[in-house]
Image: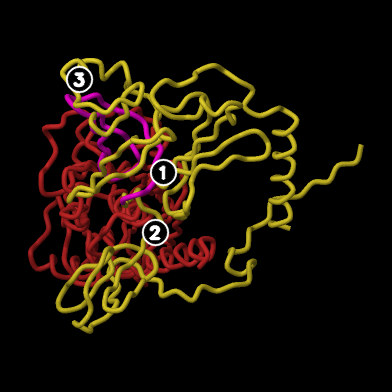
Amino acid sequence: MAGLELLSDQGYRVDGRRAGELRKIQARMGVFAQADGSAYIEQGNTKALAVVYGPHEIRGSRARALPDRALVNCQYSSATFSTGERKRRPHGDRKSCEMGLQLRQTFEAAILTQLHPRSQIDIYVQVLQADGGTYAACVNAATLAVMDAGIPMRDFVCACSAGFVDGTALADLSHVEEAAGGPQLALALLPASGQIALLEMDARLHEDHLEPVLEAAARAARDVHTLLDRVVRQHVREASVLLGD
Amino acid sequence: MAMEMRLPVARKPLSESLGRETKKHLVVPGDTITTDTGFMRGHGTYMGEEKLIASVAGSVERVNKLICVKALKTRYNGEVGDIVVGRITEVQQKRWKVETNSRLDSVLLLSSMNLPGGELRRRSAEDELAMRGFLQEGDLISAEVQAVFSDGAVSLHTRSLKYGKLGQGVLVQVSPSLVKRQKTHFHDLPCGASVILGNNGFIWIYPTPEHKEEEAGGFIANLEIKDILKPEIMEEIVMETRQRLLEQEG
């Protein structure tokens, strides 16, 4: 497709959004009854499912237990049918490990691990449909799942991706925009304090452009926070009505 | 034969259909509960920038000067005197590790276990070697919480005839927050089954023993397979449950 315009002259993107506009987000908590916490999120066409077990006793090697805090173990998995071409991804491959490590770094910053020494928290994320912004969808789904499990957290962790095309910063990139080869930045934010849990980019970007891209990502993450906040409050209200007084 | 069919329809949120709104103060992590520094912080909160902030999603509970946030769903938190049903995961030197759906595995010390014949004596080295003969990995036991360690782990004891290894029956796992604390957790149902409501969310349903000596207790468990519930009674229960669900949705 020669000359695919990522940003038209009137300021519209390929899917009709504006530069700073997010895709439609729908989320649900408490999807699985047998897990401690679970959540499902759809960001446009990207669909992710997160399941949390814990805190529980460390299984396997007792030596990994940390005496003063909980161990956070994250695993990322991408379904074979998630991308355009069906591709079988073995479990320990490089991309899954890297994603798992990034998720672990993100959640170790947000979960109050000092409250549960010598225990383990498992977070499993699976991407069912990947249309760009998979890291962000995984983080958002995992945040909801951790809240569903009742594990104490400092704050929400809201993530969004951002890019830079034709002098404008774009928020929440879809697969078409990511594949175009421009710089992409993934940001995970704790909205209340504005602290950054994780910032990741592996492309070249002029330092003058870093500021607007970071600003666009932060604004988009705050918008995600508004939506996730609404979802959690609705869920808590429903559940407390069921539990009674 | 005419049949009634209902097509899928979006479910109304429960708060509307039940017609009641909760009067509790609901918070999500990151919410400021209060900026008043006179309050003591309890579970589910943390201090940040001179504000009391919630760390779990749930309802705020205030007792005098103590503020805590009770999460909707948590793992079991042991309190002294609770009855729990657990599964043995490990046999260690002088104790067993029991899995009770809590943050850390519970501990059952050899000295907290009743010996056969009810003798009271010091546990010797032979008792230690014979531990696996009493309880193995995978056995289910009912026990009472004796003490809670500082890190939250719970110490159990079975120093009564009503506690001990469980025999044939069915285990149902629910969230611990659904089991209320009551005077007695051992109930006999009129349909011929007995139930143990563990505070940790493990519910054990077993056939009511005809003779009192066969009570679920000690460490000699009756593993004979019995008719737990007659098929006619099971069918009645299923039909009644289905009817109640239809009434609630309709």
User: Numbered disc 1: what chain?
Assistant: A
Q: Secondary structure at mark 3?
A: helix
Same chain check for tags 1 and 2: yes
Where in the figure is residue B10, as x and y percent of width and height? Answer: 64, 58
Q: Amino acid at mark 2?
A: Val
| Gap between marks 1 and 2 measured at Cα | 19 Å
Q: Which mark is residue B128?
A: 3
Q: Amino acid at mark 3?
A: Glu
Mark 1 neighbour density, 10 Å: few (under 14) some (14–19) many (20 or more): many
Task: Give chain A's shade.
Answer: red
Task: Single out the mark in the foreground, 1 or 2.
Answer: 1
Residue labelled with disc 1:
A129
- Please report the residue visible at 39 percent of the width from the left and 68 percent of the height from the top: B59
Q: Amino acid at mark 1?
A: Gln
Q: Secondary structure at mark 1?
A: strand
* Depth order, front residue of A196/B44: B44
Asked if marks 1 and 2 touch (Cβ < 8 Å), the reply is: no
Residue B28 inside the magenta-drawn segment: no
Majority secondary structure in the magenta region? strand
View extreme (right): residue: B1
What residue span does the magenta drawing correspond to? B80-109
Q: Is residue A48 left or right of residue B49?
A: right
Where in the figure is residue B32, as x and y percent of width and height? Answer: 28, 76
Where in the figure is residue A83, as x and y percent of width and height? Answer: 38, 39
Residue labelled with disc 2:
A14
Check the image and report above or below for B186 versus A4. Answer: above
| Gap between marks 3 and 1 measured at Cα | 55 Å
Task: Give chain B's shade.
Answer: yellow
Residue B103 inside the magenta-drawn segment: yes
Same chain check for tags 2 and 3: no
Whichever of callouts 1 and 2 sits on the residue coming sooner in the sequence is 2
